Amino acid sequence: MKSQGKKRHLHALGVNLLLCIVSVSVFLGGTEALARLHYTPQKVREDSLFEYDKDKVFRLKKNFFGSDWGGTYSTNSHGFRSSEITKEKPENTKRILMVGDSVTFGEGVDNNEIFSYYLERQMNEYYSGSGKNVRIEVLNTAAPGNSPFQEYYDVKRGLEFDPDLIVLQITLNDIIDAQGKWIFSVMGTEESKSNGVSSSYITGRKKLPHLDFLLKQRSALYLFLKDMNSRVRFRDAGGELIAEKAAAEENDDAMLLILEPENPAVKEGMEYALSWIQIMVALAEERDIPFVLFVTPFHFQTGYYEQNAYPQHELRRFAEEENIYFADFLAVLWQLLIERKGGKKTINQIIDEWLTSHSTLMEDFREEFFLDFVHFNPEGHKLAADTLMPIVIEALNLQNTSE
């Protein structure tokens, strides 16, 4: 009797458990269906250059071809915008690991117009002309939207290719700009209602939970719950001002770097960026790999006085303290302008004359090298390659001597 009673009890428990599971499933299915009337889960777009990366949020797709960034581009089997290479370094080969953002990626120009391409070609011509049996390979790992957080992973992973030199390119908006949320939109994973995606995920200040990323692509109910949370957090019942209020929390004005160097946001942003760069430098030092910090400016910096180049001065100071190579593209542009004006005036004097004369001197000069406020045209890329070449030669030659 006790055995039969226990069986009936277990049977009833099983039925109740099954009914509970069915009820919950029906409830969740129904609420998911209702949520999909207003919220649409989004998959990573097949036609996007980017794909999700659980460590650094995004990366370039492998073996990808496109033309939606203003120029024709392609990636190799490793996801680099450079020629196909093997992971194992060939004999008599020197490799340059190029790490950076959209400037190094070469937004707006073709594959054969980016400075990594020009540098590889010029370096091979140099070694060929010197009679040395050395071949140069430049691995361009850069991606639009990269911050020092992504670039750290690019350096770490790039070490597998046994580089002989690492070049890190930094633009000012890598330091304080919080506009990286556009990456989610380009990938097709931007939340459909509330703009709850934080730029802190892109910069590495917050860890993007893998489960969160997966649920946002599969569940409208999850998007609804996140939207409700954002409305409560920002005290915006209608949800119309969430994006505006979220943006106000993230200081994204890179102009502060130039105009207000003592601003706490600038200090904090610079310190945070340098902390990641310092880790990259340490990785290189552990393996005795020379490191080059290449700083590229906003084009309008050419028209600001030399003392306003605070970020360049700060990054130069950092490079000197870390005993690494430093290349300042703004200084190169200024020197070129000084030479064109006869070499007898300082850049501040030239700027004074430009401001008082109301001429188009600076505007015309910028158009020679820039596509927009930050990206180079082919001539700008050639000048960048020319800027890096003597530093690269010195670094590789010194490395050969030490070996």
Image (cartoon, rainbow, N blue to C red):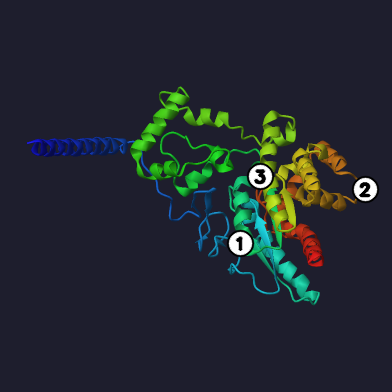
Which residue in the structure is indicated by mark 1? 160
- Residue 212 vertical position relative to residue 398 in the rendered view, above or below: above
Look at 54% across and 38% down and name the residue there.
206
Q: Is residue 351 visible?
A: yes
* Real-space Cα separation, disc 2 to disc 1, in angstroms: 49 Å
Which residue in the structure is indicated by mark 2? 344
User: Whole-percent x and y of residue 128?
Assistant: 76, 75
Look at 71% across and 33% down and name the residue there.
267
Determine whether, in the image, residue 335 is placed left or right of residue 159.
Answer: right
User: Whole-percent x and y of residue 346?
Assistant: 88, 44
Front of the two marks 2 and 3: 3
Q: Which mark is residue 276?
A: 3
Front of the two marks 2 and 1: 1
- Residue 124 vertical position relative to residue 61 in the rendered view, above or below: below
List the single residue furthest toward the right: 344
* Crowd class of label 1 (few under 14; some 14 to 19; many from 20; radius 10 Å): few
